[in-house]
Image (tube, rainbow, N blue to C red):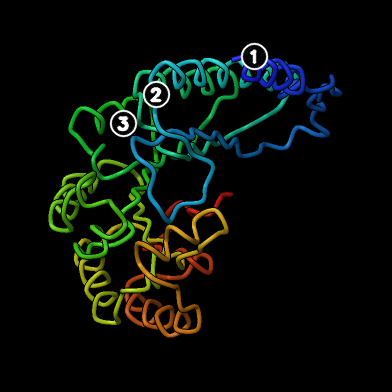
Amino acid sequence: MLIEKLICGVARKKNADYLRFAPGESYEVPKPRDAIPRLLYLHVPFCEELCPYCSFNRVVFREEIARAYFKALRKEIGMYGDLGYNFNAVYIGGGTPTVLMDELSETVNLARDIFGIREVSVETNPNHLTEQNLAQLKDMGVNRLSVGVQTFDDGILKAVERFHKYGSGEEITGRLKETMGRFDTLNVDMIFNFPTQTMEMLERDLDILTGLAVDQATFYPLMVSTSTEKLMDKKLGVVNYDRGRGLYMKITEVLADDYRPSTAWCFSRDDVMIDEYV
């Protein structure tokens, strides 16, 4: 008993300064150098569940924390307005920006009031393509909606733990059909070169996309970071980067008739808003 008390006392003393940091210099945002209109990027890092392959800055959604975050975000938007910044477009990415529609609406409206925003782009997931959400997004002036689909293949969706969250490829296709025509641009985010993805699987994804005739599609190669590598190896297997070129060439070949490459990864029909602002 005495030894236990001595050990606890020593441990408390040794760890007294744990996570106590010396005061650092505060960072002040500089005033704009000119009045040129710029793009405002807002990051909403919350997801209902975390996908194993994603290495973006994101955390599991908790409403109390998310509401506090949105409040702080609006405060920072006001700060940039006070400094004289000029933004004519806003891109809201994540995470999943549509986890709290009321907070998102208030944030977009504030940016509009302060900066006179003319273009609003928002990212979302297939399970948020509900009639109520789509109506709210339209009401808040969203021009461009980007939906993270990644693939329509049920086997891959299950392997990356998206099937139970967002539904089957067929269900996702149905939601996209109901969303078509509601916004100036509907973008679909796709991923290629999953370890278990065959050329036939990719061709089927492309067939579904071209059949939908979405305004814009982005195809990103699966990028595994040090933070996701072990989990990805366990869930899907090791990524073979050497075969990525062949898959990419198939994408450009199939989309060539109806889409033009806006960037390396983005393919657009007609003159629509480009995805890769950031």
What's the mark number on residue 62? 2
- Residue at image position (55%, 59%) is 225
Q: Secondary structure at mark 3?
A: helix
Q: Which mark is residue 138?
A: 3
Single out the mark in the foreground, 2 or 3.
2
Three-letter amino acid code at disc 3?
A: Lys
On the image, the x and y values in percent for residue 77 come to 61, 21
Q: In this picture, is 138 found above or below 247?
A: above
Q: Count the marks: how many?
A: 3
Q: Earlier in the sequence, mark 2 or mark 3?
A: 2
Note whether 143 is above or below 27 in the view shown. below
Q: Residues within 10 Å of mark 3 (few under 14, many from 20)?
A: some
Left or right: 228, with 49 as reference point: right
Q: Return the disc, 1 or 3, that comes first in the chain's sequence.
A: 1
Q: Nearer the viewer, residue 168 or 17?
A: 17
Dot 1 falls on a residue whose secondary structure is: helix
Q: CA distance from mark 1 to mark 3?
A: 68 Å
Q: Which mark is residue 266?
A: none
Residue at 56% x, 22% y is 73
Q: Mark 1: which amino acid?
A: Leu
In the picture, the quarter occupied by the N terminus is top right
Seen at 68% across and 17% down, the residue is 79
- For the residues labelled 2 and 1, the Cα–Cα distance comes to 43 Å
Residue 106: which quarter of the image?
Answer: top left
* Position of residue 57 in the picture relative to residue 26 (left or right): left
* Mark toward the viewer: 2 or 1: 1
Residue picked out by circle 1: 2
Q: Amino acid at mark 2?
A: Arg
In the depicted structure, whether residue 33 falls above or below residue 196: above
Residue 25 pos. (x, y %): 86, 23
